[in-house]
Image: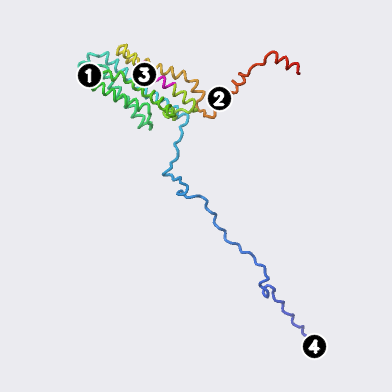
Amino acid sequence: MTEANPPSPPPPPDRDILFPEARPETPMESPAEPAEDTTLPKEQTGLLEEEHPLPPVIASEPEKLKIRQNSAILEFIPALIFMVTYNLAAGNRNTLKSWGGIWGEPIYLATAVFMAATLAALIYAVFVEKRLPILLTVVTVVVLTFGGLGIALHSDLFIKVKPTIINLLFATAIFGGLAFRRNVWRLLFAQAFSFPDAIWHVFAVRWGLFYLFLAGLNEVVWRNFSEAFWVNFKLLGIIPLTFVFILIHLPLTFKWLGKTNADYEAEKTGRDADSGLAAQPRPMRHEMDDEKRSV
């Protein structure tokens, strides 16, 4: 009889089951924490868009050139209209006399047209070009004030001293600003030009002196020449003189246009160094002979 095989012993119990404390613990992966937002709220940065808008965009060179051209045109056209109106009216005095009153005199009719043209130029600059030219604004206020007084009081004195008042106002504003370390000339034209501070100062002083010259010249002309000569001299004399004055300063303008204070200081330092080398005394003849013997 065949003997049956004995049953195999059961497998030993798992050690991890018997001794759970000895089982190494597998670290559980913690869920990824969201990245901390380091962006400060607007309330803490103090840079609220409503309170601190973006700075104005600096005009590019083509835009600056357009501003300069438009300013010159708007200042030239009213003066041209004034001269043309006066000469046409002076050539048709008989027709004007039939109108009666002050409109029978060319100077008052030309002044009224000049006032309207100056005001129209300012309105065009404000509403079409979206800018407020300070010089044209001052001119418009003085033209309307003194022109209105001249027409209302029937006195051409207010009309003839008007250019003197305008030029004196400009000169006073320039030199008064420099006295308080404020360059008015730079404030007026910083949107159209870019120069170092020292060059802005040079332009301010020279234009201030030029306005004083124009004020004195207007007084000389209207007091010593005929009314017709004074009217035509405003366009055929003052504007050419201004144009020549601008041409004289073109080399200085082109040299420093778009330059910074650092550029000016660098060139100034270079000039000082060159002048220092040039100022060094040349050695005397006996010193040169001593140097040759020592060699």
Q: Say which of 249 and 215 sits in front.
A: 215
In the figure, 110 relative to 9: above or below? Answer: above
| Earlier sequence position, callout 2 versus callout 3 | 3
216 in the magenta segment: yes
Residue 72 occupies quadrant: top left
Check the picture and name the quadrant holding the N terminus. Answer: bottom right
Q: Say which of 145 and 119 sits in front.
A: 145
Q: Main secondary structure of the magenta part?
A: helix
Residue at mark 1 = 102
Q: Say which of 49 and 292 sits in front.
A: 292
Answer with left or right where residue 233 lies relative to residue 252: left
In the figure, 129 relative to 275: above or below? Answer: below
Q: Alpha carbon of mark 3 to alpha carbon of mark 4: how far?
A: 150 Å
Residue 184 occupies quadrant: top left
Residue at mark 3 = 215
In front of the other: label 1 or label 4? 1
109 in the magenta segment: no
Tag 4's secondary structure? loop
Q: Are the residues tagged 1 and 4 within 8 Å (C-beta)?
A: no
Q: Residue drawn 79% across and 86% down?
A: 3
| Earlier sequence position, callout 3 versus callout 1 | 1
Answer with left or right where residue 223 lies relative to residue 62: left
| Earlier sequence position, callout 3 versus callout 4 | 4
Residue 256 seen from this side: yes
Q: Amino acid at mark 4?
A: Met
Q: Residue drawn 36% across and 29% down?
A: 125
